[in-house]
Amino acid sequence: MSAIFGLCRLDGSPAQSDVVAMQRALQHWGQDGGLVWVEGPVGLGSCSRHITPESVFEKSSMQICAGTVSLIAAARIDNRAELCAAFGLDSIQSAVTSDTELVARAYERWGQDSVQRLLGDWSFVAYHHQSGRWFIARDHYGNTGLHYCHVGNRFTFASGIEGILALEGIPKKPNDLKIAEMMIVWMRDGSSTQYQDIMRLPPAHHLTFENGTLKLERHWKLEDTPTRRLRSSQEYVEGFQSVLRSAVRDRMRSRFPVASTLSAGLDSGAVTVLAAEAARERGQRLTAFTSVPVYEVDFPDPDRYTNEWDLARLTSEFAGNIDHVPVPADHLSPIAAMRRVTNILHEPSFAAGNNYWIQSMLERTRDQGFGVLLTGQVGNGAASFSGGSFVVWHALRHRQFGLAHHAFSSSVLAHGSVSKTWLAEMGLPSVLSFKTLIAALSGTRFDNPEWAVNTPISQALVKRVQLLEQIKKANWLAVELHRLSPRAQMMQALMPKSIPVGATWNGFSGAYGIDIRDPTMDKRLLEFCVGVPTKEFVGQGYSRFLMRRAMQGLLPKEVQWNVKRGVQASDLGKRLRQTAPEVNEAMLELKTQPNIGNYLDLYRLESVWQRIKDNTYEKMEAISLLRAISVGLFLRQFET
């Protein structure tokens, strides 16, 4: 994916030096060149990477609309045929028309409403010369990123946050509330960053900036999708399979070979086998990468497994044309990977425990000449939705307690009072609280929030940002079960302002020169799944029932009907012990850092590290250790 950037100086001073600084900071995105355009206090630029076949015909990433608007875009448009037909382009013209040009044509014809006409992963900026108006928009739900900052007399934006950080005069202050949220795994707001004055444009949003005024609006509401009424369950299965197949094939458009991630699960398995199906039709093979542990570990939960290779191998063999590659990531330590990711994203790493295998997989993808890596990360939110609280209702009503236990233990719901009507339908006592019900089924204690026990966040930070009050105000972990419908639970995972997963993958794309694409983010697929009645996601004692049925004949039965879940980074603790000198060095850096106690409880951090060394730790503690170290190293830039 290419990068775009630009700014305007409201005081009329020249923008030339700023634009050059931004281009220099983002140059690693531009393996195939780019452009810079400056006119007085206004500047635009791009750093281009030509992944799709049509992108090679892109003379520059800037297009002129109606003679008065300059537009730049970083885009992969999936409904090309539809748009080319609307613009009257024949097959020859379509083949040499870049996605950026299609975006420009759409904006020229439909203006702001063009955001409703574009499918795929895209972001674009249109500057109106006469009025000085900026229009900046981002796709419905894709692996793209766009950051912006309005401070003083300067408004600036960039695909990568490093483009904004490169500018002199941009205040670089830590966003304490965001840091606290990230440390306790409370993804409340994906639009803010770890910097106070830099924002992230969420998916399905656009903003206008004119005369010093910024206005942010949302142009797509997935939650408004109407319920889809089909004649039979089989029609839902067939419709789902058709939409997912299209989403996968649209994301395979590339000048370079395509690879895929493959775990033992349904989502990456479905994406991989459908990609292999498309490759087979072309007489090609598909390469699939699977993360594997280096060390064998004992895991106490019998419903989880620590090595996903065996089930993933069954999937690759079943497809028949998959070259299956294990990724042990034995050359990259967890600390080294965490440092690398912090440098790439310029923010602390939320998925700190997975960094080493993710980075190793991206290295393999790049070094073996692939241009695209397919994932299925968002699948749990919609494509393979479990059914939410409906699973529990269905399971308890039919006395399927194993399914009920799994649904409770794998879902982050809430604790509080439970609807008496709901309990009556279960035949359960009306005085039973949700907290008690979960504890009875899963053996989990809720005396204290998990983050208060396992996360080395300092009480100084908790008090400074009024974290407990913020949580209470947001009603987090205090939603009554009967108010949290299955559809609402699905939307909790999919709301575009919650988790900035697309921007994270976009940052990795820029760093490694590849496109990371997720078919389970497809707008058409999300709308289809949200419109499916909840009962279609549960059946015959299984959650994720829609996906399981759709994979009949495509996945081996051992994977299709598997109910166990894999443990990502299962040998993380052993890897940390094996590279203890690196951990000790990072811990020493934190101890010598001024004011670190305002963010981290170093005593608790040392206790966590000691338990890891003694092999008496819990899995989340290893992740929180790395997440805390990531926060500490990120804060070093603010020492002055």
Image: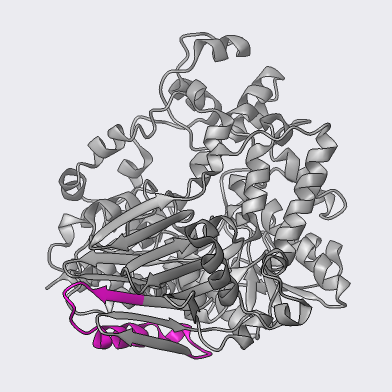
- Considering depth in this image, is 375 or 444 the residue closer to the camera? 375
| Residue 385 in view (yes/no) | no
- Considering depth in this image, is 59 or 518 the residue closer to the camera? 59
User: Which part of the image, by quadrant, shows the N terminus?
Assistant: bottom right
Please tell me whether residue 258 is drawn above or below residue 226 in the rendered image.
below
Quadrant of residue 347 within the rendered picture: bottom left
User: Which part of the image, by quadrant, shows the C terminus?
Assistant: bottom left
Percent position of residue 77, x then y: 62, 68
Percent position of residue 23, x then y: 36, 85
Quadrant of residue 261 within the rendered picture: bottom right
Horizontal arrangement in the rendering, residue 535 relative to residue 112 (left or right): right
Give the residues in magenta: 6-33
Q: Is residue 163 located in the magenta-colored stretch of the structure?
A: no
Percent position of residue 362, x then y: 56, 75
Horizontal arrangement in the rendering, residue 165 relative to residue 110 (left or right): left
Percent position of residue 283, x then y: 88, 77
- Considering depth in this image, is 42 or 521 the residue closer to the camera? 42
